[in-house]
């Protein structure tokens, strides 16, 4: 049964590969035998993450919100590896101005909204389209996994943000984040049915809150709201990702896999 999780001889492309979850995804795919293209906005960050992952991983710079950049990136990955079997469509942004990203809804800038949407959903479209073309052209029965969020499925519980702090200031879940992640869920289901007859499976990984530097007040409030009584560790997202990326999930497509400690069960 463990062989079903192996990816020997396959190539995986991970966007947002230098991020908190991206690095874990890259490492899990590498350990399963895949050659991994670590894709991130900045080439030096992608290269550093690839070196940390090891296993022959290679870094590639790409702005997923830019069609020309996506095209060039996919061409570069194909030139290096010759194929793409797995796409982990994972890149997302809070923009360079985190405080603008978390501004109150009534004061939210349309420019910030559009900047976040350009990565969180436009980038998903551009990368899925570009990689999907290579899979179709090569007759590869590929797998695409797209990262969403619990807040693309349910609304945020704003009570957990009272007294919270992250990255030097108070935090919240802005409407644009929920809207973009809900779009990822819908886009996943559409792609799954569209490419099913070509053997390309498309699924959605939905993480709950991952511990990544939030203050203790936030962590305690989040834990109290979660059936398992704690936030997730980033490493806990990698095994579900590997399930969706491998033949272990050979009869699974269009699925929204909640990895949330039971958050959405309440």
Image (cartoon, rainbow, N blue to C red):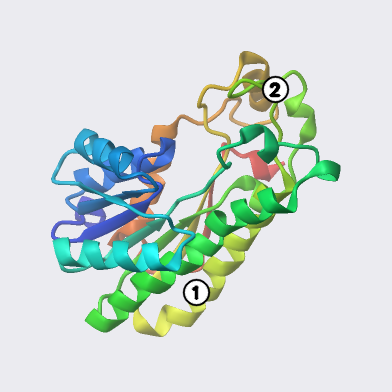
Q: In this view, does 7 lie above or below 68?
A: above
Position in image of residue 162 (x %, y %): 77, 22
Quadrant of the rendering where the N terminus is positioned: bottom left
Quadrant of the rendering where the C terminus is positioned: top right
Where, by quadrant of the figure, is residue 100 drawn?
Answer: top right
Residue placed farthest to the top in the image? 216
Where, by quadrant of the figure, is residue 227 drawn?
Answer: top right
Position in image of residue 90 (x %, y %): 44, 51
Q: Closer to us: mark 2 or mark 1?
A: 1
Mark 1, secondary structure of its residue: helix
Classify mark 2: residues with Cα within 10 Å, few (<14), some (14-19) or many (20+): some
Which residue is at the front of the view, 134 or 114? Answer: 114
Mark 2, secondary structure of its residue: helix
Please indicate whether residue 199 sits to the left or right of residue 180 in the image: left
Q: Distance between the residues labelled 2 and 1?
A: 36 Å
Q: In this view, does 55 lie above or below 87?
A: above
The residue under label 2 is 221
Which residue is at the front of the view, 160 or 251? Answer: 160
Classify mark 1: residues with Cα within 10 Å, few (<14), some (14-19) or many (20+): many
The residue under label 1 is 191
Residues under numbered marks 2 and 1 in contact, where contact means CB atoms less than 8 Å apart:
no
Which numbered disc, 2 or 1, marks the residue that appears first in the sequence? 1
Q: In this view, does 58 lie above or below 210?
A: below
Please indicate whether residue 81 sits to the left or right of residue 75 in the image: left
């Amino acid at each position: 049964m463990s062989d079903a999780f192996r990816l020997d001889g396959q190539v995986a492309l991970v966007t947002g590969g230098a991020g908190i979850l991206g690095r874990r995804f890259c490492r899990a795919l590498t350990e399963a035998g895949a050659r991994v293209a670590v894709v991130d906005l900045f080439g030096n960050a992608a290269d550093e993450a690839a070196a940390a992952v090891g296993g022959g991983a290679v870094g590639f710079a790409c702005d997923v919100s830019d069609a020309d950049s996506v095209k060039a990136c996919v061409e570069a990955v194909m030139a290096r590896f010759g194929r793409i079997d797995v796409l982990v469509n994972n890149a997302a942004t809070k923009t360079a101005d985190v405080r603008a990203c978390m501004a109150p809804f009534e004061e939210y800038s349309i420019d910030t909204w559009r900047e976040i949407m350009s990565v969180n959903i436009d980038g998903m479209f551009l990368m899925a389209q570009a990689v999907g073309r290579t899979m179709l052209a090569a007759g590869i029965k590929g797998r695409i996994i797209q990262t969403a969020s619990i807040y693309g499925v349910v609304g945020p519980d704003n009570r957990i943000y009272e007294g919270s702090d992250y990255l030097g200031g108070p935090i919240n879940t802005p409407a644009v984040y929920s809207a973009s992640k809900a779009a990822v869920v819908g886009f996943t289901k559409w792609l799954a049915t569209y490419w099913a007859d070509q053997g390309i499976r498309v699924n959605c990984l939905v993480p709950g809150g991952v511990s990544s530097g939030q203050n203790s007040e936030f962590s305690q409030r989040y834990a109290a709201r979660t059936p398992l009584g704690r936030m997730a560790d980033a490493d806990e997202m990698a095994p579900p990702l590997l399930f969706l990326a491998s033949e272990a999930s050979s009869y699974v497509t269009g699925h929204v896999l909640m990895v949330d400690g039971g958050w959405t069960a309440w």
